[in-house]
Amino acid sequence: MDFTILKEMLDRRQFTRLTHILKTMRGVDIADFLEELDHKAALLVFRLLPKDLAVDVFSNLSTQHQSEFSMIVDERELANIVEELFFDDRIDYIEEMPAYVVKRILKNSSEMERRLINQFLNYPEDSAGSIMTIEFVDFKKHISVREALRRIRNTAQQKETIYTCYVIDDERRLEGIVTLKDLVLANPDDKIQAIMETQIIYVNTYDDQENIADVFKRYGFLALPVVDQERRLVGIITVDDIVDVIELENTEDFHRMGAIQPFRESYLHTSVTQLAKNRILWLMFLMISATISGGIIRNYESALEKIVALTVFLPMLMDTGGNAGSQSSTLVIRSIALGEITVRDTLKVIWKELKVSFLVGLPLAIVNLLKIYYIDGYGMLLALTVSTTLLVTVVFAKIVGGILPMIAQRFRIDPAIMASPLITTIVDAISLIFYFRFAVWIMGI
Amino acid sequence: MDFTILKEMLDRRQFTRLTHILKTMRGVDIADFLEELDHKAALLVFRLLPKDLAVDVFSNLSTQHQSEFSMIVDERELANIVEELFFDDRIDYIEEMPAYVVKRILKNSSEMERRLINQFLNYPEDSAGSIMTIEFVDFKKHISVREALRRIRNTAQQKETIYTCYVIDDERRLEGIVTLKDLVLANPDDKIQAIMETQIIYVNTYDDQENIADVFKRYGFLALPVVDQERRLVGIITVDDIVDVIELENTEDFHRMGAIQPFRESYLHTSVTQLAKNRILWLMFLMISATISGGIIRNYESALEKIVALTVFLPMLMDTGGNAGSQSSTLVIRSIALGEITVRDTLKVIWKELKVSFLVGLPLAIVNLLKIYYIDGYGMLLALTVSTTLLVTVVFAKIVGGILPMIAQRFRIDPAIMASPLITTIVDAISLIFYFRFAVWIMGI
């Protein structure tokens, strides 16, 4: 977005006009604008906003900017804003802030509020408990639709959603769900009991957010109730938060597949040392693993001394093997993530990859044979050695690439780590063994 | 899901009990159950379902099963179901079915309906027009809230959502948006005009679905209006469809990054020849590109003849270079996809990757040096040659990995193709050149 006009107004101190425009904008856009300003200007603009909008803007600032902001606004003002945040945003904020800021904010909170915050901070990262919010509409089943609607009208402003409402019993156990659509369509004198849906899909506070995202994707819900061990309703998760979860989980998979320790801050906001830390372990591990390939070459040094030309085709064989394996592992990893295949399909995957590998391996091998013999001008025996190795490597790579993610899944390891880098390292070693064996057999060295 | 109990009931012909249970299930789950049955049993179960549920189930069947189903149910029955599908599902269905099936279904449609369907079939794939639906609530701004609510009650059953309603003028141009929440909270005598939101974010029929998903992610909407060139409201897109779009776009990126031509059917539903087709082009291209590396080796054959030991470290150098480059390209590709970095950040990315590359490259090079000299027992000059090459390769790989996706983005090519496989091929060639140069300089061959 381009904020040039807004910045000009700010420079010319046209605050009335600026305020007028800001009021027509959405919180997330104003947050972007603030992040482009220096502290003083940002604070000035922030104070022009009506309270509701200010809270919305604040919840949309990046963690880093929220933290900077918390240092420059005064205590009273900050407490007022944090107070008004939706509960899930408040928890996110408190989690990220340094302890002394949190202390300042919570000073004025009630005992009950503080206990609740503590409970939320204790839910495991990525659990339903850690992403749910407590601002939902609930009522008992014996009230009428008219009463329910009145209730919604009175409390709607503080609720994250009013489109799905929850029916609970005296022990706060979840008994049913009523959508605002049901309520609007029902006769006002109907009892909630008569119109509520009792076949409820719900999740537990300790369920993993990835599984929760799957439930949303499967059923197309707008919100999902979260219950504790006693099936008491403790929170809800809304679809807009789940959209973030989906992208987060995908990012995690991309990172793992690129041999990077996953992290959550944006690339530009992550420090150089942190970025280095997230990469070095995998690089080191893969580098050391690659020495196995070196060891194999060392074993055949005498063969190589006789026919140095064998070395010429090493990169092509290793790269093609790696690529063939990555293709299979990428497909299988993604299909597992989307729930399209499970461990039960392992044999189907192997059989499929076997057929595909011959279909792609044969043309590759033939092109290779012709190129080495006719274009490069090497002998037919060398051409045959390289092409046979290529075919066998491709077949082998595709089976390994297809099967390793399934094995990982079976042992509850994230299949995403069985991606290109690891497959390449494994396939490299195997293709070298094939290569030298075939060289010995075919060329008789 | 486990359908054993349902299958038992089916075998024992306990249809009343089975029907009773099916009625408590969701469409998507019943669809999964049907897909596990043979045609005859599936048709039998399908006919047990009440009409609404049957339609829901049908829309959740995979394309393949929808197609098979269309062959076995009778014409009247099929037309009845298709008639009841939401418009976007109907379009999806018609797009996938063979022409003679479509003809059978549309035989009884009105002229207007057929024209509308044709218009929808003509929207480009992945455009807003191709994923929108026409079942939305609209009214004029001068009616009262009470009237609007009455209107909603009368038409709600046929609408994809009633939570966001659209205010249009006499030319059907979009003037405002009213949520059901606004309506429920407002005074029934208020005019729509007084409560509608006029700062509307909307998309155009030809906008790409990836950009639309970004709008949803940014603003957390439940629905988004789609207008034509004259700003006339022609459809809406709901968040549940966008969740599918997000996963589809991610799958496309995963496929591209794994050197696969992207495709949409699930892995198990895709034929072996199709899978082979989607892989062979990239494999062939990368295989031929890899011969550049072979050519470099050929150039230095005499050097290799003198020191065959140089070959031992080829796999490690090539793999580590490839991995270092993939890490950077993965991060940058993902950050571009999430909108966290743009072409304007190119210099920042290069500078960051340069620093990171030294931070990870130096420890790798040192470990290598020590290992080659002390553990492998090679001479110090060879150890120095390999380690220097490793450091330079890592630095180079990280810069290339960071910069190529940015260049692709600049020229509107999908950055995802600048992933591991292509980077590896490029880095391989460069690392070989460094390797032999350093060997000549350091070891004096």
Image (tube, coloured by chain):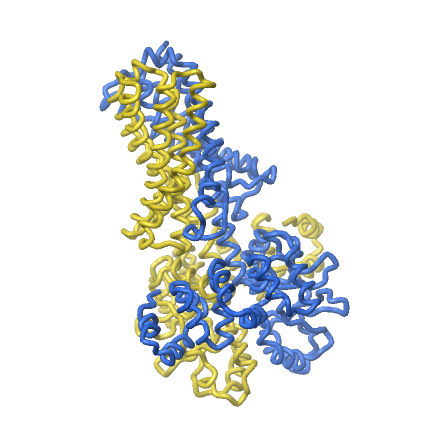
Chain colours: A yellow, B blue
Image quarter for residue B222? bottom right
Q: Do we see residue A229 in this rendering?
A: yes
Which residue lies at the image location 53% right of the left edge and 90% below the top edge? Answer: A189
Q: Position of residue B367 (x, y in %)?
A: 30, 28
Q: Position of residue A384 (x, y in %)?
A: 36, 23
Q: Nearer the viewer, residue A405 or B261?
A: B261
The total number of labels drawn is 0
Which residue lies at the image location 65% right of the left edge and 60% below the top edge? Answer: B226
Q: Do we see residue A82 in this rendering?
A: no
Q: Position of residue B292 (x, y in %)?
A: 46, 23
| Quadrant of the drawing holding the C terminus of chain A | top left
- Above or below residue B303? Residue A197 is below
* Furthest-bottom residue in this view: A189
Q: Nearer the viewer, residue B300 or A107?
A: B300
- Above or below residue B339? Residue A236 is below
Image quarter for residue B121? bottom right
Q: Nearer the viewer, residue A3 or B317?
A: B317
Q: Position of residue B359 (x, y in %)?
A: 39, 32
Q: Nearer the viewer, residue A340 or A104?
A: A340
